[in-house]
Image (tube, rainbow, N blue to C red):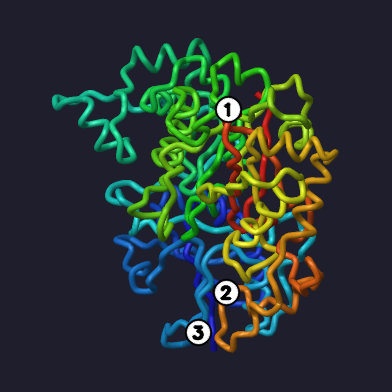
Amino acid sequence: MYRLIAFLQTDCPTCRLIAPYLNTLARSVSVTAISQDDEMATMEFVLQMEIAFPVELDPGFDHSRKFEIVTVPTLCVVDEQDRIVRREPGFDKNAMNEIAAMFGVAAIASPFDGAPASKPGCMSRHLEAVTEGAGAEALDVYSKRGKAASAVDVEEDPFEYCYRTFGDALPVVPPTVERVAAMISGRDPLEVIARIPPCYGEATVEKIAANAVMAGCEPAMMRVLIPLIRAVTDERFNAHGVQATTHFAAPLIIVNGPVREELKFHSRQNLFSNTARSNSTLGRAMQLILLNLGGARPTGIDMSALGNPGKFSYCIAENEEENPWEPLHVDQGLTREQSAVTLFAAEAPHGVSEHKSRTARGVLKAISYALATVWSYRACLAFEAVVVLCPEHARTIHRDGFSKKNVREFLFENTGVPLRCYDDAEPGEGTEQRTMYKEVAIDGEPCYQKFRSAEAIKIVVAGGTAGKFSAVLGSWSTGPRGSQMVTYPV
């Protein structure tokens, strides 16, 4: 006879998401939870979530180690000898319904019950960098007031201390009380702006300011940084998944509107380089916040196999003055007069050189060949891309009468993978899903269409006015289970 063991943490949002489903399952099935937190936090969690099944503690994390738990929640279906029959990490409706079926119970999760189809969990306590001492407090998701940031008071060189304790792999500016106060500029220091995935640390105004100081931001940058932190914690962006994936993706910031000039964001030559203080420090401040408050360190939760230089700083501004069409934030629903920040989970730029063509079709065909390689050449549908058009390419395309909508549609219709690329008997990534792909003809050759729609291709005009070099930036997995582009007004 099987029983279900659920490993949980009291401050994990995904554990709170899964609790009501476990309550439903417990009406018919033997369910036991193992809490990785102390008795007080666990009791509060049980009361808050109205838990209807036994919850045991895990002092020393003996149970977590025995069952080799990596993330929470993890559901383990075990037999009478505690041998694992099925293990399911995170929250996944299909998996929960399959587990219910193993016990002869009807489906417990509906596609239309208001919860996402899936959501990743948090790192197991025994694998965290600091696990000794008191357990975590129960998460109060309604609290608008956070705790004060800890002060740096050490005898050693403060630069070396902060570099070792709070930095990525570059030196940081020590966040002294005076520097942080200047960055806060009269705001309520304990106001909670958001909770940062994957570990959901409180991003108070003070803690955001401290990380901004370490990144070298000027105080005026808080005007952009606060809406940016709200954007990165938007569930549609799914920072939890972006930060924990083995993929290359890093959060790319795109700045639009009057704030570009007001805060001197760079949008021209050397766009992705270390050209401007505003671009570099805003991008780095967000990365330090994801690292210090979100816990996404490359020695633990951040599992990217190769990474991306954008994880130091990944911030550009659109060159709206050279853009013959509406800028990105207008495409995203805002007005041209508004300032905005947009986030996209992006791979590193893939350059496209096209200096010979004098037509829109010629330039866009060159870009379509690069787009076909997004993620993996034979994989289709599940990805998006940002195309950064240099001003010279944008002028050539616009001169031929193309609107931005025409550009997206041309790239969509002309980006595909020839069917002959799937003829190899050796299976490869993307080959198993080919029955889902749409077959089209591109230049007379049968192909599978690369993208699910024209809207999956975003257009930005940026870069220097000399040189016909554009770029393609592929995405992480998109849709409800992946990451979606989000835009927030400044």
**Of the residues under marks 3 and 1, which one precedes in the sequence?**
3
Compared with 217, 42 (above or below) is: below
**Alpha carbon distance from label 3 to label 2:** 28 Å
Q: Residue 138 at x, y = what percent?
A: 48, 45
Compared with 406, 213 (above or below) is: above
**Alpha carbon distance from label 2 to label 1:** 36 Å
Q: Say which of 474 and 289 sits in front.
A: 474
Q: Residue 100 at x, y = what percent?
A: 66, 77
Q: Which mark is residue 429?
A: 2
- From the image, state whether disc 2 or disc 1 is nearer to you: 1
Q: Secondary structure at mark 1?
A: loop
User: Residue farthest to the left?
Assistant: 155
The amino acid on which the numbered mark 1 sits, given as a three-letter code, is Ser
Q: Which residue is pictured at 53% across the width and 76% down the height?
A: 4
Q: Residue 84 at x, y = what percent?
A: 46, 82
The amino acid on which the numbered mark 3 sits, given as a three-letter code, is Val
Quadrant in the picture for residue 300: bottom left
Q: What residue sits right under mark 3 in the picture?
A: 85
Q: What residue sits right under mark 1 in the picture?
A: 267
Q: Secondary structure at mark 2?
A: loop
